[in-house]
Image (cartoon, rainbow, N blue to C red):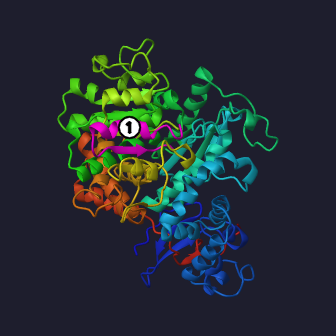
Amino acid sequence: MIVTSHADARRFEERTDPSTGEAYLAVNRRGIALKDDPLLNKGTCFTLDERRELGLSGLIPPAVSTPEEQAGRAYENYSKAATDVDRYVFLAGVQDRNETLFHRLLHDHLEEMIPVVYTPTVGQVCERYSHIYRRPRGVYISAAERGRMVQALENADRDDTQVIVVTDNEAILGIGDQGVGGMGIAIGKLALYTAAAGIHPARTLPIDLDVGTDNPALLNDPLYLGVRQPRLRGIEYFALLDELVDAITKVFPHALVQWEDFANERAFEVLGRYRRRLLSFDDDIQGTGAVVEAGVRTALDRVGRRLDAERVLFYGAGASGAGCALQVRSAMRRAGVPEAEVGRRVLCFDRQGPIFADRPGLGGHKQSIAADPSLANGWTSAHMAPRDLLDVVRNFRPTILVGVSGQPGSFTEPIIGAMQAHCPRPIVFALSNPTSKIEARPDEILRWTNGAAIVATGSPCPPVRVGNLAVEIGQCNNVLVFPGIGLGATAVEANWLPDEAFAAAASALHGFTAGPSFEGASIFPRLTRLREISRAVAVAVGQALVASGAAPARRPSEVEERVASRMWEPVYQRYRAGWPDGDSKM
């Protein structure tokens, strides 16, 4: 196993003993300061020599554990937790004490633990954040930090930050405004950057932009830890965000920023305002779009159809729905569909009904996803009952239906039946999460279609028995692309992320499920292959960025080498004192 250290100069530095050739970490902590530093703490795995040299004698039980014994002990305690939220709290405690052990557990139990550290459990964590809070992680920015944001970021004690996740907490999963509790999303995403792409935890930073909350339950909660005021809007909001962006470019000039869970139109405004100002992307818009494109392409492989002949209906036109629609439109163009025809093949549906370009007052991101109004010519009742999804399915006759609405149960048996009436093997993605928000359960969709549908969901779901066949349900999980996008972009030192980067990510992911498969196989690869997938996505994205001119010129082999060299493994290295005389006054 290759071990690569990305040194935080204030804490540790990778060195080689000139006499023996042994690689080791020179650490600038000792005693309690070392034991209490989660980025350096080894717990019971400190060797006797390390304990004597680094002032740890007497501070740790005398037995020296192997990493396997230490991880086994932690997993035993994890397994005893009664609920997923309890398991989350346990893992958060491990992360706060020992980052390497936390990431070792996550690395070894990916499929089991990702639903705990991220969706669906993280939704409950965000809702209960102020009640289960243990200790701070990351940086909290509010209006109180105006004029001092550079100092606030410097207080994070990070010298070489590679990836930052910023949320303003307004659109957390499908549960909406969670105020300061949205920090759970940023923390969870960065844990997955490390688990999937090997970004060293010392090079990640979650930032919670607390602009207030419009959630009355939070404002009335005496234990709420966030700013108790209605959300800032308009000029005040962007003045605060502008200052944060300026501070990030000064303190962390080489970092990539992932915008996370910004609400609908605000998400597009933020992406457009800062996309060329600092290296950044919106995972809800662009990450989800890339994963959905890959899933659609694999689903079409399974049923023997081509994208250029499909009709796609998106139920939900917020940030994720619109981002997916834009990505599929782009994929159709790449598949040879003429521009005029694209506007007749992809239809989006929001609270007011189908989105056509002639809708009065249409503005913002919905202009870019609006369909050709002539598409409705001859429809029997669409304009009389514009909110009726069943009516639109009967008239538009989609072959692919994607739910990103947050409206549980909105895909009914009559709707799926109307779809199958003109498409024997419908493709249905019910992507809203957490699971309580899903448009239809996979078992329902498969029962209604006699097992003919190709189904994917946003949260993990167990296999569904159809006759003698166990049908695996693909999870359209953004973790399949966003860590690789971040790794690839930072590895090649990109200036910005053009659309070609997300097309490359989708193609790389599709490559893991393209070709022959067994009947009932998931349309997405298993999370046990996450490191392999992230590396392939990173290389594809890096090469696409070089080819587009968004990154300095590099040979394909150099891109591969740069990606590989940045993938940290959660294993312990030998420690030595970081001072020439082996002593420290710290």
Between 470 and 244, the one nearer to me in the picture: 470
Relative to 184, say whether 74 is above or below: below
Q: Where does the N terminus fall, quadrant-wise?
A: bottom left
x%, y% of residue 176?
60, 37
Residue 416 within the magenta-colored segment of the rendering = yes
Q: Identify residue type, mark 1.
A: Cys
Q: Quadrant of residue 215?
A: top right
Residue shown at 29% from the left, 20% from the top? 372
- Is 115 situated left or right of 288 in this image? right
Residue 481 within the magenta-colored segment of the rendering = no
Residue shown at 73% from the left, 29% from the top? 229
Q: What is the residue that sits farthest to the right in this orientation? A: 222
Q: Does residue 14 appear anywhere in the picture?
A: yes
Badge count: 1
Q: What is the residue that sits farthest to the top in this orientation? A: 360
Between 362 and 256, the one nearer to me in the picture: 362
Between 344 and 376, the one nearer to me in the picture: 376
Relative to 106, say whether 295 is above or below: above
Span shown in magenta:
407-432
Residue shown at 62% from the left, 46% from the top? 183
- Is 323 situated left or right of 34 in this image? left
Assign a secondary structure to mark 1: helix
x%, y% of residue 100?
56, 69
x%, y% of residue 51?
66, 82
Q: Does residue 496 appear anywhere in the picture?
A: no
Q: Could you classify mark 1 by the number of other residues whose Cα lies within 10 Å: few (under 14), some (14-19), or many (20 or more)?
A: many
Q: Quadrant of residue 151?
A: top right
Q: Where does the C terminus fall, quadrant-wise?
A: bottom right
Relative to 119, say whether 37 is above or below: below
- Provide the residue designation for mark 1: 324
Residue shown at 55% from the left, 30% from the top? 242
